[in-house]
């Protein structure tokens, strides 16, 4: 057969969408994930502040208003506990909600700094961390508002708070309380920035990869649309002359000149058969281009559909040996879809071309999916073809337009919500596995009451 992580870091917000009354909603789980990260960071801040207050008060002998500072911490812990309960159930998180959560953090930090030296407190530079988090998580207007709020808080602390009696003796060197506080604040901000920026970069790379995959899918769908237009044009152009030939050949069959000559009559009948086959090929081209004709659909079952498909394929192909095993085991109703039939036949044809001596097909019921495994004993896939499996024009057949069969197979399966995988067998040959969700191909009970057609 031929050419065919979880992270807990704070994630950047997606592109802004249409704003609702409460702010712009994120289209995925990024907003909720960011809010949960803020909750985790707030618990770390509560523990860190308790430790810092106790060390400064009892270790350095610097008198702090413990009752007031611990009351602020109790308020922060209560707010965080309420937030954790609120955001335990998955739901959308707006930019405004994230902004309010960060404003609460800034307010609590300002209260603690006011009670412990104001602008002279070395931990005042934690405001920068709040601004950086806002720049990562929030929209532009929210970030600039946060910048203004933190500047106002810093200015207010400088104007209204009273500095702590800290030692300024230069002989203490590194052990001066202010220098120790600055060192701890610098190390904390630097470490958090390294951790967050590294994780955010990894998330951005993952997002870029997903966007690249979406762009690739869009390009493939556009390619299919172009193929469908070309196929439709060809069908319209060739349909009329083929119909004319069919009428002429039908008339010839009744002319005395042909009826009196068995050999000529046989040739006319053969020509009629070939014209009919050309019409069938045109229909197949339309199906491959995604223009399945619903008028040919009929109600059947999964097992019957597969058995009939295999019987028709076996009688029209010159396979030396074909092994078919139907292990589906459930007689579920479905509609005989010509596009699905064409997709399976494309995989079988590709296997037969690579391995005329033997082709195998196994059908199985795997959970809520139908699994079709096509095997052969041919040369298998080249590594570069496996890496580009399902991409258009990836073929080793060396002819123009090659490689479209599996490309269409992959896209039809993806349209049904399924998948197609390929691998080489250790003993030689290749295996292509089609996994199709039963919900996409079978009929539900209420569908059967409507003459077997989906509503």
Image (cartoon, rainbow, N blue to C red):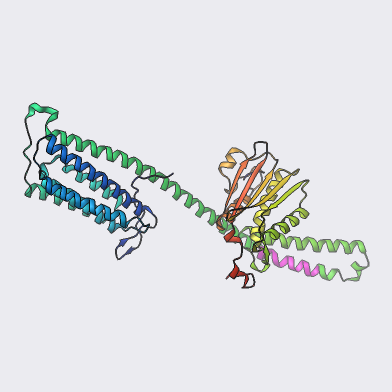
Residue 59, percent from left and from top = 13, 34
Left or right side of 357 for 403: left
Residue at 92%, 63% (x, y): give it: 262
Task: Tell me if residue 368 can be seen.
Answer: yes
Q: Which residues are magenta?
A: 235-248
- On-image quarter of the C terminus: bottom right
User: Residue 242 in magenta?
Assistant: yes
Q: Is residue 93 magenta?
A: no
Q: Nearer the viewer, residue 356 or 298?
A: 298
Pinpoint residue 244: horizontal percent, then vertical percent: 75, 68
Q: Is residue 146 visible?
A: no
Left or right: where 95 falls relative to 320? left
Left or right: 275 as drawn, with respect to 339: right
* Most common secondary structure along the magenta stretch: helix
Q: Is residue 175 above or below residue 308?
A: above
| Residue 385 figure quarter | top right
Picture residue at 23% right of the left edge, 35% below the top: 187
């Amino acid at each position: 057969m031929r050419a065919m992580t979880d992270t807990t870091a704070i994630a950047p917000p997606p592109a802004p969408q249409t704003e609702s009354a409460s702010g712009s909603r994120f289209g995925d789980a990024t907003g909720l994930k960011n809010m949960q990260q803020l909750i985790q960071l707030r618990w770390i801040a509560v523990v860190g502040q308790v430790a810092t207050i106790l060390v400064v008060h009892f270790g350095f002998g610097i008198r702090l208003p413990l009752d007031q500072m611990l009351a602020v911490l109790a308020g922060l812990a209560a707010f965080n506990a309420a937030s954790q309960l609120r955001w335990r159930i998955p739901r959308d998180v707006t930019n405004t909600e994230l902004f309010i959560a960060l404003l609460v953090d800034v307010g609590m930090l300002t209260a603690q700094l006011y009670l412990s030296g104001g602008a002279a407190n070395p931990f005042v530079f934690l405001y920068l961390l709040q601004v950086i988090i806002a720049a990562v998580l929030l929209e532009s207007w929210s970030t600039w508002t946060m910048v203004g709020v933190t500047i106002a808080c810093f200015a207010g602390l400088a104007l209204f708070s009273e500095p702590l009696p800290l030692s300024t003796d230069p002989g203490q060197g590194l052990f001066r309380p202010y220098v120790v506080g600055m060192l701890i604040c610098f190390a904390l901000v630097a470490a958090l920035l390294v951790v967050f920026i590294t994780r955010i970069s990894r998330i951005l790379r993952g997002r870029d990869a997903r966007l690249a995959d979406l762009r690739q899918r869009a390009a493939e769908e556009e390619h299919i649309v172009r193929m469908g237009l070309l196929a439709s044009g060809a069908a319209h152009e060739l349909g009329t002359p083929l119909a004319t030939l069919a009428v002429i050949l039908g008339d010839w069959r009744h002319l005395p000149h042909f009826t009196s000559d068995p050999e000529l009559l046989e040739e006319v009948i053969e020509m009629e058969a070939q014209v009919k086959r050309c019409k069938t090929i045109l229909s197949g081209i339309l199906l491959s281009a995604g223009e399945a004709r619903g008028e040919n659909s009929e109600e059947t079952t999964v097992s019957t559909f597969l058995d009939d498909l295999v019987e028709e394929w076996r009688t029209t192909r010159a396979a030396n040996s074909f092994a078919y095993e139907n292990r589906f085991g459930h007689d579920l109703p479905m509609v005989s879809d010509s596009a699905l039939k064409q997709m399976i036949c494309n995989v079988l044809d590709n296997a037969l071309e690579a391995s005329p001596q033997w082709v195998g097909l196994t059908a199985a019921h795997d959970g809520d999916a139908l699994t079709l495994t096509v095997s052969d004993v041919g040369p298998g896939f080249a590594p570069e073809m496996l890496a580009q499996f399902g991409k258009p024009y990836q073929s080793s057949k060396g002819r123009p337009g090659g490689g479209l069969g599996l490309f269409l197979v992959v896209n039809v399966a993806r349209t049904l919500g399924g998948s197609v995988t390929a691998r080489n067998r250790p003993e030689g040959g290749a295996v292509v596995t089609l996994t199709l969700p039963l919900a996409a191909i079978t009929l539900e009970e209420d569908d059967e009451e409507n003459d077997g057609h989906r509503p």
